[in-house]
Amino acid sequence: MTIRDFIQLSVLKPNKIWTILQNPLKKIKGIFFLLVLLVSIPGFIRAGKDIASMNTNLGIVAKQFPELSIQDGKLSAGDNTGFVYRSDVFNIVFDPSGKSTDNDVTSESSQGIP
């Protein structure tokens, strides 16, 4: 809307002045929505890649994880061999013997071992 249109509207139809404010707000809302969408796209792409990576890693872990059973009211693995699975997304430590402590796992993770 030009200044001339604004003057005409304010002189001829003063009760319609609110339409001047209404139109720019619609445009601002649309521009704001598009900017938010544009800024969010890299996050969506990154999240999609991370979810796909986690899905792949969980498939690998499911194949390596030993069968578990309950004997004498305790959860036990068929063979007492554990494994450590490290990826860029997460680490999984399975130690049925109980030799690894929380501090061991934390120290390995804090040393930059993925």
Image: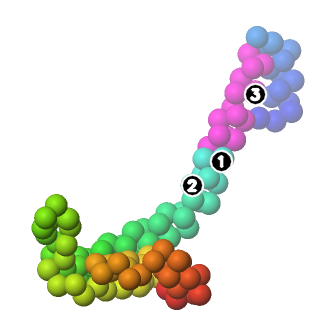
Task: Determine the CA span between mark 1 and mark 3.
Answer: 16 Å
The kind of residue on which mark 1 rests is Ile
Relative image position of residue 38 (x, y in whole percent): 59, 59
Between the residue at mark 1 and the residue at mark 2, the CA separation in whole angstroms equals 10 Å
Residue type, mark 3 in image: Leu
- Residue bearing the label numbered 3: 21
Boundaries of the magenta span: 16-30
Q: Within 10 Å of the Cα at label 1, are there few (<14), some (14-19), or many (20+) other Cα atoms? A: few
Q: Is residue 20 magenta?
A: yes
Q: Nearer the viewer, residue 97 or 26?
A: 97
In the picture, residue 42 is in which quadrant? Answer: bottom right
Residue at the image point whose x is 75% and y is 20% from the top = 18
**Residue marked by disc 1:** 31
Verify CB contact (< 8 Å) between mark 1 and mark 2.
no
Of residues 97 and 49, the one nearer the viewer is: 97
Q: Secondary structure at mark 3?
A: helix
The x and y percentages for residue 82 are 29, 85
Please say if the residues under marks 1 and 3 sit with CB atoms less than 8 Å apart: no
Q: Position of residue 61 (x, y in %)?
A: 28, 79
